[in-house]
């Protein structure tokens, strides 16, 4: 991996020759209404902001609320300990980004607050469009790679009316991105679902930044894992509104399982003041498969769901209703193939294959292919105990059993022995 310092050195070389990227930055009171207290479209655990062995409350995002006006997408990242002084030395400043994917294009709207770094080096680096000093909209931005000859000229940053406000009094970083920009660079009408939605907190280190928190937590690709439907302005009295309603819903259960396993699904329900709501019915659904549970005294509803769907990416929809007002959250949910284990044993001249999953559950009705001394010896099917039997193998022969992968369901496995 390219070191940050090498990246810094390479960016400095072309800094002053690159075009200036306009900066739009505000650090005063918000011009738009704030979300209803305690209401988020996307949540993140408190106290999980950490880089290496450090931690910083000033970079801890606890939730994201989204709103659409006639002209803008508004993103609100809640940082309860947001401070004008930032995380302190040795960092130059703090930077927050609102990220999402729309019509296959990856957007990153970013703004910074500087408390420590000054001088010509930082200001020169800002001109490259790579430095974190400026307020920038990135669309399909390439990875930092100074060895790429197109690195300086093809930065992925675009002209935009993006504004970023740091509301230190109320603990919000507010993104105001014109819908016209989204439609221009996304090449489609702004509607439907946004994926990989979330907010990212970083420290500025001149030309580069270090990620401290992603809300919601990042997936395997390093991107936020949230999903949001355009127009779901529930925290602002819009479609599916929770403002004025008694329930604010958040999903806190599993987001991944293997085929055939059981997932633990759970959700928290609180009122507008943040107090737990007991006895609220909550429905969890993946497609047509669903289950329901009621919240306990702590406002937590939890149960299990065993979706009989093949491996793939799905959306788990969690829904609750209070006083006739329905609230839903959508969570990315991944089903992966079940890992399998094949073991061989011998009994009375027979070779017995036992096929189980990685939870030691027998897999019945699956075919096991046999070879003896490298030659095919046919296939047998596992019984209810996961056993498949090879009845004819000369003593001392090399025996191999193979369970081939079952697409979307089971991973393959093999085992060998001597008869």
Image (cartoon, rainbow, N blue to C red):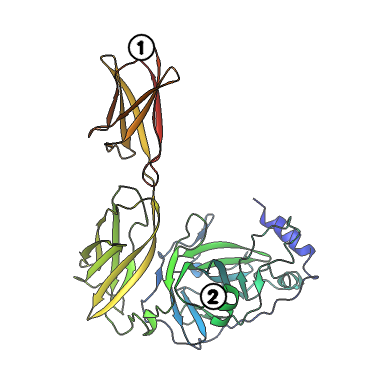
Quick check: 398 above or below 404?
above
Question: 107 or 207: which is nearer to us?
Answer: 107
Few, some or many residues within 10 Å of mark 1 (<14, 14–19, 20+): some
Residue 16: x and y in percent read 79, 70
Picture quadrant of residue 371: top left
Q: Is residue 232 left or right of residue 130?
A: left
Q: Residue at x 34, y 39 (%)?
A: 358
Question: 7 or 305: which is nearer to us?
Answer: 305
* Residue behind mark 1: 394
Residue 44 shows up from this direction: yes
**Residue at the top extreme of this rendering:** 395
Picture quadrant of residue 131: bottom right
Q: Residue at x 28, y 77 (%)?
A: 326
Q: Which mark is residue 209?
A: none
Residue 111 shows up from this direction: no
Question: 407 or 237: which is nearer to us?
Answer: 407
Few, some or many residues within 10 Å of mark 2 (<14, 14–19, 20+): few
Residue 5: x and y in percent read 70, 57
Q: Residue at x 49, y 80 (%)?
A: 74
Residue 141: x and y in percent read 63, 65
* Residue behind mark 2: 188
Picture quadrant of residue 6: bottom right
Q: Is residue 184 left or right of residue 324?
A: right
Quick check: 369 above or below 205?
above
């Amino acid at each position: 991996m390219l070191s940050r310092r090498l990246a810094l050195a390479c960016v400095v070389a072309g800094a002053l020759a690159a075009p200036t990227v306009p900066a739009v930055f505000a650090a005063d009171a918000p011009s738009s209404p704030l979300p209803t207290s305690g209401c988020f479209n996307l949540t993140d655990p408190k106290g999980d902001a950490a880089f290496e062995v450090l931690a910083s409350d000033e970079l801890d995002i606890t939730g994201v609320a989204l709103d659409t006006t006639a002209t803008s997408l508004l993103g609100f990242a809640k940082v309860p300990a947001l401070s004008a002084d930032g995380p302190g030395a040795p960092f130059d400043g703090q930077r927050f980004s609102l990220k999402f994917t729309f019509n296959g294009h990856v957007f990153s709207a970013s703004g910074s607050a500087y408390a420590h770094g000054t001088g010509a080096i930082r200001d020169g680096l800002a001109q490259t469009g790579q430095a974190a000093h400026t307020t920038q909209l990135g669309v399909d931005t390439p990875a930092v790679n100074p060895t790429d000859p197109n690195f300086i000229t093809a930065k992925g940053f675009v002209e935009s009316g993006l504004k970023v406000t740091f509301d230190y009094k109320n603990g919000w970083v507010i993104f105001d991105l014109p819908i016209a920009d989204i439609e221009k660079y996304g090449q489609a009408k702004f509607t439907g679902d946004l994926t990989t939605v979330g907010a990212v907190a970083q420290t500025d280190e001149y030309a580069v930044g270090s990620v401290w928190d992603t809300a919601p937590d990042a997936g395997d690709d390093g991107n936020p894992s949230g999903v949001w439907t355009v127009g779901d302005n529930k925290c602002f009295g819009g479609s599916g509104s929770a403002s004025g309603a008694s329930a604010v819903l958040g999903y806190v259960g599993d987001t991944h399982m293997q085929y055939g396993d059981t997932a633990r699904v759970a959700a928290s329900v609180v009122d507008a003041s943040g107090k737990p709501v007991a006895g609220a019915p909550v429905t969890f659904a993946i497609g047509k498969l669903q289950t329901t549970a009621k919240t306990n005294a702590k406002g937590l509803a939890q149960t299990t769901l065993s979706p009989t769907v093949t491996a793939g990416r799905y959306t788990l929809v969690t829904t609750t209703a209070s006083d006739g007002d329905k609230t839903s959250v959508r969570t990315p949910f991944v089903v992966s193939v079940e890992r399998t284990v094949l073991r061989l044993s011998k009994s009375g001249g027979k070779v017995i294959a036992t096929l189980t999953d990685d939870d030691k559950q027998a897999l019945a009705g699956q075919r096991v292919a046999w070879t003896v001394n490298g030659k095919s010896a046919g296939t047998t099917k596992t019984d209810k105990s996961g056993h498949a039997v090879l009845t004819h193998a000369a003593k001392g022969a090399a025996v191999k059993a193979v369970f081939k992968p079952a697409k979307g369901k089971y991973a393959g496995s093999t085992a060998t022995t001597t008869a």
